[in-house]
Amino acid sequence: MKISISKNFIPLIVIIGGCVLLLVSFGIRHSSGLYLTPISNQLGVGREVFGFAIAIQFLMIGFGSPIFGAIADKYGSGQAALTGVILFIIGLYMFSLVESSLFLIFSQAIFGLGCAGCGTAVVLGAVGKTVLEKNRTLALGVVMAAGSLGQFLIVPLTGILIAASDWQRSIVYLCFIALIMIAFSLALNLSGKNFDTSHSQDRPLKAVLAEAFVNKSYILLTAGFFVCGFHVAFVATHLPAYLEDISLAAWVGSWSLGLIGLFNVVGTLMFGRLGDSKSKKNLLVILYSLRSILFLIFIFLPKTEITILIFAALLGILWLSTVPLTSGIIAVIFGSRYMSMLYGFTFLSHQLGSFAGSWFGGRFYDIYGSYDIMWWICVALGFASAAMHLPINEKPLEKIYT
């Protein structure tokens, strides 16, 4: 028996499905940094090995995003998300079985592909195709806020699970939590079914890609997003270990990442709302500049539990607030028909930045014995990204259908 769903409810169903997918996947993925110390100690390796494994995870998310985006655009977001969830759970369980550096890297590669399938490229594309343009950036901000809420809820929970049992068993518990995503991934099958999008089939994919890859604004937006990935990956992967190095308790690291997630709920909703009425590129200039200023202050700030938690809260407001604005600009310029794939290519740049941030963090630590140089690199890259966004023209291209 076929179930009929009113078109008025389709956006809400898709948004709820996307919120749950990002809440669970972001929460679990951002817990990875909590395993740096126990796994490195068990394998008897330096931090570069774990940092490289997480970098491979980020890289696979990047390369997988345009692929899953293309699958979502052609066959439906639900199918793409379900495939991603299955790979996500398989890779996560393999993570609990790690006994060698090679297997650690392989598990993160599978896990990264899974993250791509049930991550932002597919979810934001599904929401973008379902919500009216006047409310699109806010809707994208809502689902990103759910991902940040997952970080706030699941990262501290993971820290508790590690302390209460052991790191292997805690990952198995996370696998059971991840099973929730299977049912909610199917909600994305309704993406775009409240609109008549048949006219957009007239626009060949190759033509859209050809225009995108020579479009100055798209290139600058994509290049600037590299910096977001660099910042996020370095902090998420290495902040807990950095705090342990300066003799702060382990709970400070997990709760710092949790606070980043909590306050990013505020940030993504606030900037998502502003993005529907203000210039998205100007908001991105402000965001990246504020990140650099905050990192600069952090370098000279006395490091105590209170100052670290305040830093985490402020960084949280700026954390992934870039995503609804970046994806919103893509939808404005090129329309929503191929949004999943086009955002997927931009997100690939983000994940290349994540690869660099995660790996270089471990590499420089093993060479110099500290993360000092990485904090300065974060400052410089933030200002560079802000400058890249200034020339962006966020107006629709001619002959692009929405």
Image (spheres, rainbow, N blue to C red):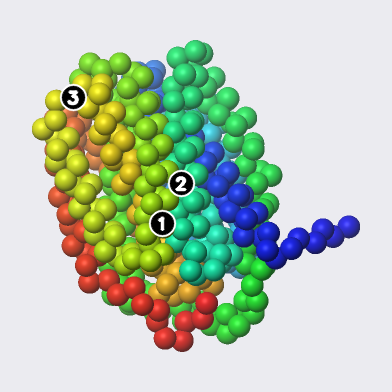
**Of 122 and 128, which appears nearest the observer?**
128
* Residue 283 can be seen in this image: yes
Dot 2 alpha-carbon crowd within 10 angstroms: few under 14, some 14 to 19, many 20 or more: many
* Residue type (three-letter) at the residue carrying disc 1: Gly
Q: Secondary structure at mark 3?
A: loop
Q: Which residue is denoted by mark 1 in the rendering?
A: 272
Task: Measure how far apart labels 1 and 3 are at the Cα level.
Answer: 32 Å
- Residue drawn at x 68%, y 59% is 9
Is residue 382 rendered to the left or right of residue 238? Answer: left
Q: Are marks 1 and 3 in contact (CB under 8 Å)?
A: no
Question: Which label's residue is closer to the chain start, 3 or 2?
Answer: 2
Determine whether 346 is above or below 256 in the image. below
Q: Which residue is denoted by mark 2 in the rendering?
A: 145
* Residue 49 can be seen in this image: no
Q: Are marks 2 and 1 in contact (CB under 8 Å)?
A: yes
Q: Position of residue 332 (x, y in %)?
A: 42, 72
Q: Which residue is denoted by mark 3 in the rendering?
A: 303
Question: Which label's residue is closer to the chain start, 2 or 1?
Answer: 2
Q: Position of residue 351 (x, y in %)?
A: 37, 51
- Residue drawn at x 41%, y 37% is 262
Task: Measure how far apart labels 2 and 1 are at the Cα level.
Answer: 9 Å
